[in-house]
Amino acid sequence: MHGDAFDFPPPTPSDLGDHEVPRDGDRLEGVRVALLVTGGIAAFRAPILARALRRQGAIVTAFATTEALRYVAREALAWACDRPVVVELTADAEHLSDSAPFDLYLVAPATYSVIGKCAHGIADTPVTATLASAIGRMERGHAAVVLAPTMHGSMHTSILVSNLRTLASVGCTIVPPRDAYGKHNLPEEPVLVDACAAALQAVSLRPQ
């Protein structure tokens, strides 16, 4: 190894705090986002997604299933969102968010199981209970719900398609997955940010 391989200067000083993010725009300025992270391997990208949303001005709170925490650390999500991660519901009724309602709910990744539960009204976990409330708020024109399905290609079944059609029919936005290696993969962060901004715009056009 070259003798001065470690002879490099300290990083350039920055005014940003450790949890702050550099801003790329204001498309989600002040928007309260519930990032619902479910148990697919793509969950490892959730902290990057959270920061991409924050770069557009969003205030992001992560909700994570027990399975999701097999693929992404709770601490990483908390650091990326700059707020605690919701993994269980307490007397504060986090899934209702009455004191500071969420404007947008993004399920990324959205697994086959959670899609099926949501489409059939099953609310047996903190994430699916939050989704049940989210759809109620969406149907009243108070929030947007966006799902990004990810799963192995063998799980693309008529049941999945039917469930996604059900969710789309009540107003949920379904973001088409990125097709690669025989799998439905999570889209790149800019695609998801675009989908969130478009879904919010559609909600804002509804009569209140």
Image (spheres, rainbow, N blue to C red):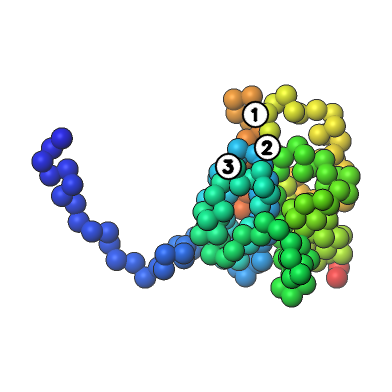
Residue 38: percent from the left, percent from the top?
68, 46
The image's mark for residue 93 is: none
**Residue designated by label 1:** 183
> Dots 1 and 2: beta carbons under 8 Å?
yes
**Residue designated by label 2:** 150
Is any part of residue 95 visible from this angle?
Answer: yes
Look at the numbered disc 3 and give the secondary structure of its residue: loop
Residue 6: percent from the left, percent from the top?
18, 47
Furthest toward the left, the residue is 3
Image point 88% across, 49% down: which residue? 121
> Dots 3 and 1: beta carbons under 8 Å?
no
Three-letter code for the amino acid on which mark 3 is drawn = Tyr
Q: Is residue 177 left or right of residue 139?
A: left
Vertical relation: 129 (above or below) 71: below
Is any part of residue 58 visible from this angle?
Answer: no
Residue 46: percent from the left, percent from the top?
58, 49
Look at the numbered disc 2 and give the secondary structure of its residue: loop
Mark 1 crowd level (few <14, some 14–19, many ≥20, 10 Å Cα): some
Residue 99: percent from the left, percent from the top?
74, 75
Look at the numbered disc 1 and give the secondary structure of its residue: strand
Q: Earlier in the sequence, mark 3 or mark 1?
A: 3
Q: Relative to the observer, which residue lies in front, 167 or 193? A: 167
Give the Cα separation between the discs numbered 1 and 2.
8 Å
Q: Relative to the observer, which residue lies in front, 127 or 47? A: 127
Vertical relation: 10 (above or below) 169: below
Q: Quadrant of the N terminus?
A: top left
Indicate the quadrant where residue 60 lies.
Answer: bottom right
Q: Quadrant of the C terminus?
A: bottom right
**Residue designated by label 3:** 71
Three-letter code for the amino acid on which mark 2 is drawn = Thr
Image point 61% across, 47% down: which residue? 69
Three-letter code for the amino acid on which mark 1 is drawn = Lys
